[in-house]
Image (cartoon, grey):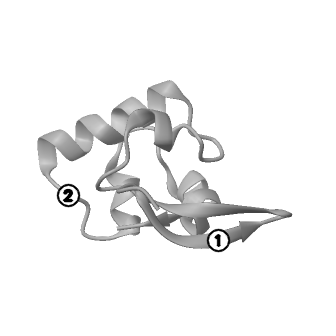
């Protein structure tokens, strides 16, 4: 497991390492459902400006990451 990986989650037939939102690169974040280059860049910019996320729920403070998106990506995340 790399520095951006937490635990392993089964997604359908594949396994996906949980993404540590405090360490993940934009490219790693883009592997998440609904997260493209713009949202990934916003997550990293927010983290760089405000410091590490205390919990996965703190992602809803990032512009463009609302409660609906957070609900869909939460199973793939860790801090």
At 46% from the left and 26% from the top, the residue drawn is: 38
Residue 33 rendering spot, x and y as whole percentages? 65, 46
For marks 1 and 2, the one nearer the N-term is: 1
- The secondary structure type at the circle numbered 2 is loop
Q: Which mark is residue 67?
A: none
- Between residue 64 and residue 10, name the one nearer to us: 10
Front tag of 1 and 2: 1
At 37% from the left and 39% from the top, the residue drawn is: 25
- Between residue 9 and residue 71, name the one nearer to us: 9
**Location of mark 2 (residue):** 52
**Location of mark 1 (residue):** 9
- Between residue 48 and residue 2, name the one nearer to us: 2
Residue 67 rendering spot, x and y as whole percentages? 52, 58
Please identify the residue farthest to the top as the structure is shown. Answer: 38
Please identify the residue farthest to the right as the structure is shown. Answer: 13
CA gap, disc 1 and disc 2 = 23 Å
Q: Is residue 68 above or below residue 45?
A: below
Q: Is residue 60 above or below residue 7?
A: above
Q: Is residue 48 above or below residue 41?
A: below
Residue 45 rendering spot, x and y as whole percentages? 25, 35
């Amino acid at each position: 497991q790399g520095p951006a990986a937490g635990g392993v989650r089964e997604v359908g037939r594949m396994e996906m390492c949980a993404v540590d939102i405090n360490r993940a690169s934009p490219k790693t974040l883009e592997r998440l459902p609904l997260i493209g280059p713009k949202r990934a860049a916003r997550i990293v910019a927010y983290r760089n400006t405000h410091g590490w996320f205390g919990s996965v729920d703190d992602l809803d403070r990032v512009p463009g990451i609302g409660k609906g998106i957070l609900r869909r990506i939460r199973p793939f995340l860790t801090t």
